[in-house]
Image (tube, rainbow, N blue to C red):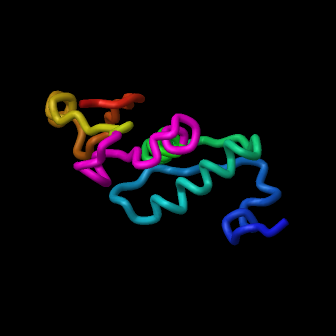
């Protein structure tokens, strides 16, 4: 059985942590790590962006929404599974200098 480089790097891991971050840099690799964790029963902890990654991976792999994405990475995605809600952001903005509230929605939006 052949393994991808990602699988070789993750083999033997006792757990996978995907931390927060901003922008789409490295997102596809993080999605592969989340998929590896799910398929191999490896404990996974996604913090902020990491949780978004887990939701995107699950939506694509398990729910069959192959183009599922976050509106942060693809504003025109046909299957947004993570969306940014500016109305919530602007309510808390005076108290925080960065947007720390992420609301997760699973499912299709029209």
* Residue at 29% over, 49% down: 72
Tell whether 27 sits left or right of 24: right
What is the quadrant of residue 93 in the picture?
Answer: top left
What is the quadrant of residue 6 in the picture?
Answer: bottom right
Depth check: 51 or 36 in front? 36
Is residue 67 depicted above or below 12 in this figure?
above
Number of disc labels: 0
What is the quadrant of residue 58 in the picture?
Answer: top right
Tell whether 24 sits left or right of 53: left
Residue 77 placement (x, y as % from top left) = 29, 47
In the rendered image, residue 23 lying in the magenta stretch gets the answer: no
Task: Give the prevailing secondary structure in the magenta stretch.
Answer: loop
Is residue 106 depicted above or below 72 in this figure?
above
Question: What is the magenta range?
Answer: 58-79
* Residue at 80% over, 69% down: 2
In the rendered image, residue 75 lying in the magenta stretch gets the answer: yes
Residue 51 placement (x, y as % from top left) = 49, 40
Residue 108 placement (x, y as % from top left) = 35, 31
Depth check: 36 or 95 in front? 36
Tell whether 1 sits left or right of 30: right
Is residue 6 depicted above or below 57 in this figure?
below
Tell whether 54 sits left or right of 48: right
Residue lying at the far right in this picture: please name it.
1
* Residue at 17% over, 36% down: 86
Depth check: 64 or 14 in front? 64
* Image quarter in which the N terminus is found: bottom right
* Image quarter in which the C terminus is found: top left
Residue 56 placement (x, y as % from top left) = 46, 43
Is residue 92 depicted above or below 7 in this figure?
above
* Residue at 75% over, 41% down: 41
């Amino acid at each position: 059985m052949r393994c991808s480089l990602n699988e070789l790097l993750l083999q033997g891991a006792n757990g996978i942590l995907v931390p927060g971050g901003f922008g789409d840099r490295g997102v596809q690799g993080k999605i592969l790590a989340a998929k590896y964790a799910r398929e191999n029963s490896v404990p996974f902890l996604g913090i902020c962006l990491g949780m978004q990654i887990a939701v995107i991976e699950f939506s694509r792999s398990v729910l069959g929404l192959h183009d599922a994405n976050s509106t942060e990475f693809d504003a025109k995605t046909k299957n947004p599974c993570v969306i940014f809600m500016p109305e919530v952001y602007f309510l808390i903005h005076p108290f925080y200098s960065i947007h720390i509230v992420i609301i997760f929605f699973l499912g299709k939006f029209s």
